[in-house]
Image (cartoon, rainbow, N blue to C red):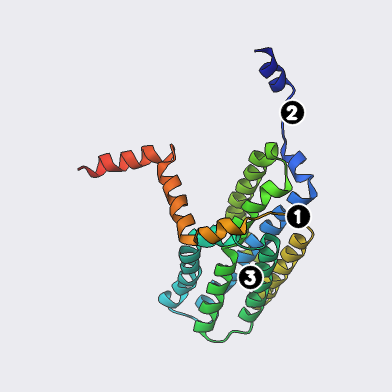
Amino acid sequence: MMEPLKACAGTTRVTFGQVLRRRPFFALWLARFISSIGDWLALLPLFSLIAFQRHGSAAETSMVMVSFSIPVILLGPVAGALIDRSNLKRTLIICDLICAVLATLLAFSGHLYQMYLLMAGLSAASCFFLPGQTAALPLIIPANELLVANSINVQTLQLNQIFAPAVVGFAVAWLGEKNCFYLDAASFLVSALLVSTIRIERKTSRDVFARTSIWADLKAGLKFIVGHPVAQPLHSKATTQNGP
């Protein structure tokens, strides 16, 4: 009985500062933070360009959000499975470079359909960064720091959703839409540079991937979610409310 107590007493508390002082995690966290702001640097200036500069209709303006959301809906569920079958570091860098090119092209786009396609491409490439970051965490930090690392990422994402639109709104007013697109491209280049400094080693089993398909992995993931103790009470509540 005394051994578990001694083990607990000897366990040190993991702090935010301790995790952030790890250079690989800090670089990956900062890359994600910068690229998430980059998403707003494309989205809000494009809204402003279509609604105020081009005096677009409500339907034309709303298509910006539609073009951003469709890739998330289509690629979001399978992005993690695709990440597992690829070189993690190379995929993250390539996605950032693609986003940088697309953001630059937004500054030169003249037709609405071009803007929608470029925004869809930006959204599609960004879909791979979050699952890629999640997959990289266990490879760059100790297991006892994973909980704190994930907490930092979640809180950063929430704060970004609160403050980033306001900051980008001021940037649009001061710099103009096109300069925001250039700044967006630069943010993705910085993100790619940060990821390139991280050493990510992952041993994958090609035999396992050969025997399982992406759809099999997706099905297994959905089955896990449905069977998870957190999801079961929600499912039971919904069934009760809907009735037999």
Depth order, front residue of 87/127: 87
Amino acid type, mark 1: Ala
Marker disc for residue 12: 2
> Is label 1 in contact with label 3 (beta carbons under 8 Å)?
no
Q: Secondary structure at mark 3?
A: helix
Residue 97 on image: x %, y %? 69, 72
Marker disc for residue 217: none
Amino acid type, mark 3: Val
Q: Single out the mark in the foreground, 1 or 3.
A: 1
Who's the residue at 64% across and 75% down the image?
A: 103
Residue 10 on image: x %, y %? 75, 23
Judge whether 103 appears above or below 19 on screen. below
| 96 left or right, relative to 27 | left
- Mark with earlier residue (3, 2): 2
In the displayed orientation, state which residue is furthest to the bottom: 110
The quarter of the displayed image where residue 80 is located: bottom right
Q: Secondary structure at mark 2?
A: loop
Residue linked to disc 3: 172
Residue linked to disc 1: 27
Q: How many neighbours does mark 3 have within 10 angstroms: few (below 14), some (14-19), or many (20 or more)?
A: many
Depth order, front residue of 115/144: 144
Depth order, front residue of 234/167: 234
